């Protein structure tokens, strides 16, 4: 079974999209939903920058695991084309990628934009993460339908 890829997009790939990546990865694991890979990228990312300290702190406080080795990546056309869904933090980011049918946004899915917390205090990052997490059930329902792998398919056939 081929993994499906969900990509979160923001501007610099150091705050919002890495928090969304970590939060969705943790929620998929908690729900035992397999066959998805989650990653993030930025439209104007400085390649190789670490996740912001406040983003790390917000994730740590929420007990959401993340990689200390995280480094920012710039969104490429190849990444968009390989993704099942590309989820932008804002409508303006979605509009920048409007030529791709697999691109959506938090606003299109949940009626909320995710403002950039960059340069602000930890409380703003906490609120940003909270809003991202509130949107995850809808994102999972729309973008991550349960995909059965080979072992699940054979179990289902035996039970028929």
Image (cartoon, grey):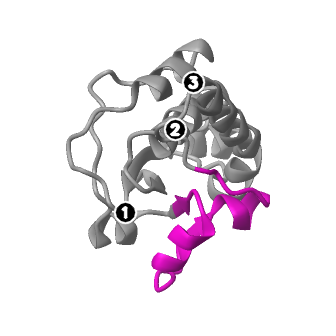
Q: CA distance from mark 3 to mark 1?
A: 23 Å
In this rendering, position of residue 103 left or right of residue 70: right
Residue at image x 68%, y 57%? 113
Residue at image x 24%, y 50%?
Answer: 46
The residue singled out by tag 1 in the image is: 43
- Residue farthest along the front direction in this orientation: 120
- Mark 2 falls on what kind of element? helix
Spatial CA span between label 3 and label 2:
43 Å
- Could you tell me which residue is drawn at 63 percent across and 17 percent down? 62
Q: Do the CB atoms of the residues marked 3 and 1 lie less than 8 Å apart?
A: no
Is 124 left, or right, of 50 in this rendering? Answer: right
- Give me the C-alpha separation between circle 1 and circle 2: 38 Å
Q: Visible in this render: residue 42? A: yes
Return the residue nearer the eye: 59 or 126: 126
Q: Which residues are magenta?
A: 86-115
Q: Nearer the viewer, residue 64 or 6?
A: 64
Q: Earlier in the sequence, mark 3 or mark 2?
A: 3
Residue behind mark 2: 151
Q: Position of residue 123 (x, y in %)?
A: 64, 25
Image location of residue 17, percent across then percent down? 48, 46
Pick out the residue farthest to the bottom.
99
- 43 relative to 156 in the view: left or right: left
Pointer 3 local density, CA inside 10 Å: few below 14, some 14–19, many at least 20 = some
Tag 3 residue: 122
Mark 1 touches mark 2? (CB < 8 Å): no
Please check the rendered image and state whether residue 87 is part of the magenta-colored stretch, yes or no.
Answer: yes
**Sequence-wise first label, 3 or 1:** 1
**Which element type, helix, strand or loop, lies under badge 3?**
helix
Task: Single out the residue that lies furthest toward the left.
Answer: 48
Q: What residue is rendered at 28% in x and 66% in y?
A: 76
Specify whether residue 150 is painted magenta.
no
**Residue 158 place in picture, x, y as percent:** 66, 40
């Amino acid at each position: 079974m081929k993994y499906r890829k969900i990509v979160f997009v923001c501007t610099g790939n150091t705050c919002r999209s890495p928090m969304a990546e970590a939060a969705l990865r943790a929620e998929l694991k908690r729900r035992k939903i397999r066959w998805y890979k989650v990653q993030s990228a930025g439209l104007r990312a400085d390649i190789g920058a670490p996740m912001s300290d406040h983003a790390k702190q917000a994730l740590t406080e929420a007990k959401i695991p993340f990689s200390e080795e995280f480094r920012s990546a710039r969104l490429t056309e190849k990444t968009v084309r390989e993704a099942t869904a590309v989820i932008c933090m804002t409508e303006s980011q979605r509009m920048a990628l409007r030529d791709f049918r697999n691109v959506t946004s938090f606003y299109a899915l949940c009626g909320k934009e995710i403002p950039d917390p960059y340069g602000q205090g930890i409380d703003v990052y906490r609120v940003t993460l909270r809003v991202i997490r509130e949107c995850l059930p809808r994102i999972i329902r729309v973008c991550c339908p349960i995909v059965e792998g080979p072992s699940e398919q054979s179990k289902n056939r035996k039970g028929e």
